[in-house]
Amino acid sequence: MMVKDLMTRNPEIVGSGDPVKKAAELMEKNNVGAVPVFDEGGGAVGVLTDRDIALRLVAGGKDPQTTKTGDIMSRAVVYCPDDAHASKAAQIMEEKKIRRLLVRDPRGKVTGIVSLGDLAKGLSKDKAGKLIRQVSKPAAPPG
């Protein structure tokens, strides 16, 4: 199965200068755990996840109305081509220990986002189980 068949198309996005509250409201409205973050020039600069909000905003005692998404987002933007097989996206997630990938068309435009759960639907049970185990292994602490 191809990534473009599994991904969420045209995900809601936020700007890096938008308040985290706006992003959280979009996440709630769309029942998603992440939103891509774009800069003023229209390029993806990060992904804001519900985990970023919990750990970097709430645990950090920051105000969701004044804190900008760019201040707490995950800055590593990892892409996958929309015409890649689901197993290729799974390989990228395993290597990077991440649960979501931005998806680009052949021109480089972000057209979607694919999650670990999306991929699990498109892989065999064995491959899906392996992917979930690998991505869920704790990564080395930053530093």
Image (tube, rainbow, N blue to C red):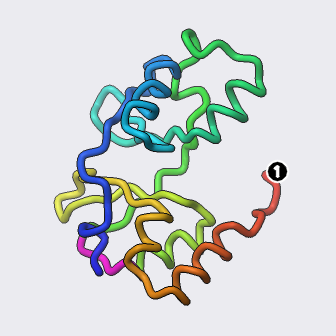
Q: Relative to 75, say whether 69 is above or below.
A: above
Q: Nearer the viewer, residue 81 or 8?
A: 8
Q: Amino acid at mark 1?
A: Gly
Q: Relative to 112, say whether 74 is above or below.
A: above
- Which residue is at a point 22% across and 52% down the rendered structure image? 109
Name the residue tied to disc 1: 143
- Residue 13, given in percent of the width and then of the height, sits at 34, 35
| Type of secondary structure dominating the magenta stretch | loop
Horizontally, is 99 left or right of 22 in the view?
right
- Which residue is at a point 36% across and 66% down the rendered structure image? 80
- Which residue is at a point 27% across and 59% down the rendered structure image? 104
Q: Nearer the viewer, residue 23 or 66?
A: 23
- Which residue is at a point 24% across and 69% down the rendered structure image? 5
On whether residue 86 falls in the magenta region, the answer is yes
Q: Residue furthest left?
A: 107
Q: Quadrant of residue 52?
A: top right
Helix, strand or loop at label 1? It is loop
On whether residue 113 falls in the magenta region, the answer is no
Magenta stretch in the rendered image = 83-87
- Residue 103, given in percent of the width and then of the height, sits at 32, 59
- Residue 75, given in percent of the width and then of the height, sits at 55, 43
Q: How many callouts does the rendering have?
A: 1
What is the crowding at mark 1: few (fewer than 14 residues within 10 Å), some, or many (at least 20)?
Answer: few
Horizontally, is 107 left or right of 28 in the view?
left
Horizontally, is 91 left or right of 56 in the view?
left
Horizontally, is 37 left or right of 42 in the view?
right
Q: Quadrant of residue 133?
A: bottom right
Q: Relative to 34, say whether 16 is above or below.
A: above
Q: Nearer the viewer, residue 116 or 48?
A: 116
- Residue 46, given in percent of the width and then of the height, sits at 48, 42
**Which image quarter holds the N terminus?**
bottom left
Q: Relative to 127, say whether 110 is above or below.
A: above
